[in-house]
Image (cartoon, rainbow, N blue to C red):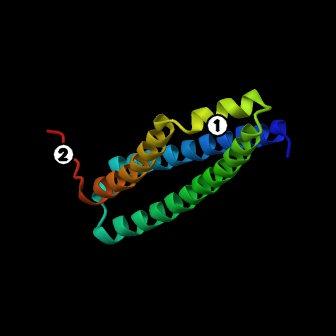
Amino acid sequence: MSEYEILSLYGAATADQTAVFSLLISLHLALIVGVFYFLHRSGLVMKLAVFALYTLAFALLLGLLYNQSSLLLAAGRDLIAIAETGQRLTAMGYAALNQTRAESWVNIVTSIALWALWGGAAYFLIFWKKKDAA
């Protein structure tokens, strides 16, 4: 593959990751609205069923997100291989950026944030009680 094709693939995978992340946020916000208006009055069985469906959807979207991440890693390795020839400045710039600590920290923080989002949804759905307005 040429450098242009790899960069196009990289851009498309990044756009797909952004779309999946938006879907994860939408799923989470829909759960919050459902709990706030309806599910806080339901029993534990209903809450567990909703949480199971939420977890299934979350896992499917997370799988799509990790699938795109593996595609980005493969494209990154290809760009680094092109950069090692020393002929392409764009590939060399990408290789330099990809080897920074900031890139590693972004990956770590994103993973922690996604699991915190899931854990927060579990706590909110199962344990949160709406205070009655007086």
Q: Position of residue 120 (x, y in %)?
A: 32, 51
Residue 44, by quadrant, is bottom left
Image position of 37 with respect to 64: above or below: above
Q: Nearer the viewer, mark 2 or mark 1?
A: 1
Dot 2 crowding, Cα within 10 Å, few <14, some 14–19, many 20+: few
Quarter containing the C terminus: top left
Instruction: Using the image as rendered, state which of residue 37 and residue 97 is in the foreground.
Output: 97
Q: Using residue 124 as the reference point, say whether residue 62 is left or right of it.
A: right
As drawn, the residue found furthest toward the front would be 85
Q: Is residue 38 visible?
A: no
For the residues bearing labels 2 and 1, Cβ distance under 8 angstroms? no
Q: Secondary structure at mark 2?
A: loop
- Residue plotted at (51% across, 62% down): 59
- Residue plotted at (76% across, 37% down): 7
- Residue plotted at (39% across, 49% down): 112
Q: Which residue is mark 2?
A: 131
Amino acid type assigned to the residue bearing label 2 in the image: Lys
Amino acid type assigned to the residue bearing label 1 in the image: Ala
Q: Using residue 106 as the reference point, say whether residue 87 is left or right of it.
A: right
Instruction: Using the image as rendered, state which of residue 54 and residue 66 is in the foreground.
Output: 66
Q: Position of residue 67 (x, y in %)?
A: 63, 57
Q: Which residue is mark 1?
A: 95
Q: Secondary structure at mark 1?
A: helix
As drawn, the residue found furthest toward the right would be 2
Q: Is residue 62 visible?
A: yes
